[in-house]
Amino acid sequence: MHALRVNELSDDLSGVELGDLPAPERQPGEVLVRVRAASLNFPDLLMMRGEYQFKPDPPFTSGLELAGEVIDADAGSGFAAGDRVMGGNKTGAFAEIASVPQGGLSRIPEGLDFAQGAALGAAYSTAYTGLVELGGLTAGQWVLVTGASGGVALAAIDLAKALGAKVIAATGSPGKRAMLEERSRADHVILAEGRFRERVAELTGGALCDIVFDPVGGDVFDECTRCVAFGGKLVVVGFAGGRIAEVATNIPLIKGFSIVGLRAGEYARRFPERGRAIAAEIARLAEAGRIAPAIDRTLPLSHWREGFEAMANRELVGKVVFDVSR
């Protein structure tokens, strides 16, 4: 089978190649899946560079998230050959066949194709965990989402709107601002440059934001601390901007807000009942047509480098999905 193999950690991905491997053998408790689509996530890039908190030793097959058809599963697992499933594991999705722990899979919601299924789970579970589980989102609240063209950020915008929030999307790119105004459901799109707190205050009538969802870090995080309302939540999602920010503790003390770290996968592992409930709610919203993943482009797996470079160069508005059958 074809698989995207990380043979050596490298900043320029020179240690990565698409090659032929034997199909994995299914272990008890796992489900063997014929992969039809796999979506690219920022941790995939970081793992190839050795920069993610989970650091598998090379060689390993890359890819967090997939969608496809069940080939084989344990009796009593709830899965049968031919079932359309989505999900994944920390690695292994960028291959024609994957063996996935059965707890890491669910059925693709009705009405979604394989590409949408591959793009739905990780982004929306991250958004839901950050906004609802940790942020306590309720209808009518103001939400600020930075790095708004990324897959997780777009999921947060989409989900927040589906749950009745008022959303400000922030991007560092003037070109992406126009695309976000056209493609996203945000109420307002602003540029995340300089002192953008004044623009947030203007849009919210001085109330600022109940939840700030920040995948960027760095200078953007610094300014986000000025955008949180009293009693609000600043959710730390990642550091796509490069610099890991620091905060003087007098700022959240004086402003009365909380800084919350988000690790959605770890949250689901530690609280499996909540993880299952989150997945069920995301599926319900998707089947009802209230949320839908934003896909920037679909590429054959043989064009994997194009997808990774587009992500690294911040060219995307939405997710890259690889068609593994091509």
Image (spheres, rainbow, N blue to C red):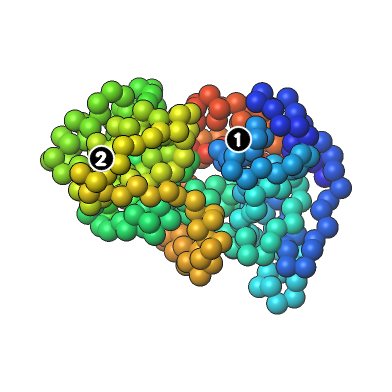
Q: Is residue 279 left or right of residue 105?
A: left
Do tag 2 and tag 1 residues touch (Cβ < 8 Å)? no
Which amino acid lies under the numbered mark 2 shown in the image of this protein?
Ile
| Quadrant of the rendered image containing residue 290 | bottom left
Residue 144 appearing in the image: no
Label 1 SS: loop
Which amino acid lies under the numbered mark 1 shown in the image of this protein?
Glu
Label 2 SS: helix
Graded by Cα atoms within 10 Å as few (under 14), some (14 to 19) or many (20 or more), the crowding at tag 1 reads some
Residue sitting nearer the eye, 186 or 311: 311
Instruction: Please give the residue where the numbered disc 1 appears in the rendered image.
Output: 51
Instruction: Please give the residue where the numbered disc 2 appears in the rendered image.
Output: 251
x 50%, y 58%: residue: 267
x 76%, y 51%: residue: 97
x 74%, y 36%: residue: 6
Q: Which quadrant, please, contains the C terminus?
A: top right
Q: Which quadrant, please, contains the N terminus?
A: top right
